[in-house]
Amino acid sequence: MKPHAANASDRPAPISEDDVIQGMRELQGYFDMTPHDFNILYQKAYALARSRLLRENKAENVMKNPAVAAKDTDSVEALIVLLAERGISGAPVVDASGFVVGVVSEKDVLSALGKKPEAGAMELIRDGIGEPFRVPQTVLQKKVREIMSSPAVAVAQETPLTALAVLFGQKRINRIPVTDENGLLAGIITRADMLDAMSRLS
Amino acid sequence: MATTRIKECLEKMKGVSQAPPRPGSQEIILAFAGSCLALLLIGALHAVCLEQAGLPLLAAPFGASAVLVFGAFRSPLAQPRNVVGGHVLSAFVGVTVYQIVGDSPLLAVSVAVPAAIALMHATSTLHPPGGATAFVGAAGGAGVHALGYWYVLTPCAAGGVLMVLIALVVNNIPKNQRYPQFWT
């Protein structure tokens, strides 16, 4: 993923010289400027505005709060039930004090079941074709902290969107917990939340 | 390569845009009326001042200023700071250059006008009629030279201020017009 600066400025605003001329006509009054010059100034200002919005918008503007979290001492069975009931594919993991200690997701559960991390849900469902599918007790009884990804890639509330975009791109993760000034869980940002935020800003 | 640079320059000469749309008839009529009124008033005062004190108020450069102030009042070049500042600074430059190289009007003008441009740019007071003001200050006639640095005050500063005052009233009469865009 390109650094945010390149992204912000390489998409021109959808405005043509004819738009400018028509605008000048409708506004009345002699504009002492050529439509071309106006357009290049407009494109520049537009790109600057996009960069600024990406900088100014912070994790706390985008995150979901409250975030569903799993406890590190929960059983994997409890985790599976939690994720299923909430309809989410992953969650931050907190310890007894509420500090973020890791992130756990479907991939970690699939891994615990002996599947490769890149395996999709379909592989599991395929296992159930013609065969009863049971989750082994050994897996269900594990603790979340045994299967989670740790340490967590987490950000502070004031982190600008630009930094978040880089993290999602570089780390190939799907969710980033957001912590407050005490390190406690404040919210969660998923890849989908990022996309929504980016499209809102365009 | 030199040839590519030459080709690039020639390419640039083709131009890349088009003229902004011409203003409507209402605006043209108002520009006529405003500048007519301004020059009549300043001209009347000029006649009085010349009689009383031999101090002129009107000069050719003010015809040029009227074009900007009434014909293109939105332009950054037509704002009060530019009208007054531009004329004052250019007049100063013109008279000064005459003092130094006045023996050759051609040289004087060739130095005074560019100097006026540079000074106006550096002070954010660029006003095209300033070039004319500097030209007249450097080349004369005799009446201008006789004024010496008084030329800066009358007609240049005084004329500029008067034109701005009239424009402040006339240009703001129509609902969708405003003048000035800025003071500083």
Image (cartoon, grey):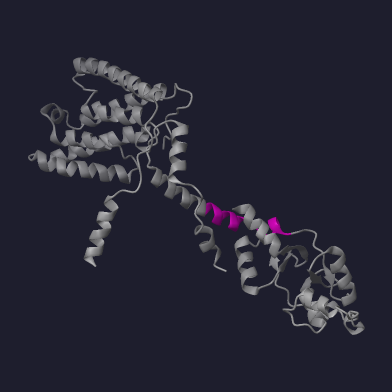
The magenta stretch spans residue A57: yes
Vertical placement of residue A14 versus B89, above or below: below
Q: Is residue B57 left or right of residue B82?
A: left
Q: In the rendered view, tell whether residue A87 sits above or below residue A27.
A: below
Q: Hey, which quadrant is residue B84 in on the image?
A: top left
Residue A148 visible in this rendered orientation of the protein: no
Please tell me in which quadrant of the rendered image residue A119 appears: bottom right
Quarter containing the C terminus of chain B:
top left
Dividing the picture into quarters, in which one does residue B93 lie?
A: top left
Of residue B125 and residue A145, the one placed in the foreground of this image is A145
Q: What stretch is highlighted in magenta?
A: A48-63
Left or right: where A55 falls relative to A67: left
Tell me residue A55's x, y (percent).
59, 58
| Magenta residues, dominant SS class | helix
Q: Count of labels shown? A: 0
Quadrant, the N terminus of chain B: bottom left
* Outermost residue, front side: A130
Q: Which residue is drawn at 7% across and 39% down?
A: B103
- Left or right, B137 with respect to A199, comes to left
Pinpoint residue B126: horizontal percent, then vertical percent.
31, 40
Is residue A163 something one can see in this rendering?
yes
Magenta region includes residue B25: no
Residue appearing at x 45%, y 22% in the figure: B174
User: Image point 73% across, 74% down: which residue?
Assistant: A152
Q: Which residue is drawn at 67% across and 61% down?
A: A194
Given residues A74 and A123, the one toward you in this image is A123
Across and down, in percent, residue B139 comes to 13, 35
Q: Which of A151 and A146 is in front in this view?
A: A146
Against A139, residue B22 (above or below) is: above
Q: Where is residue A62 drawn, in percent x and y? A: 69, 57
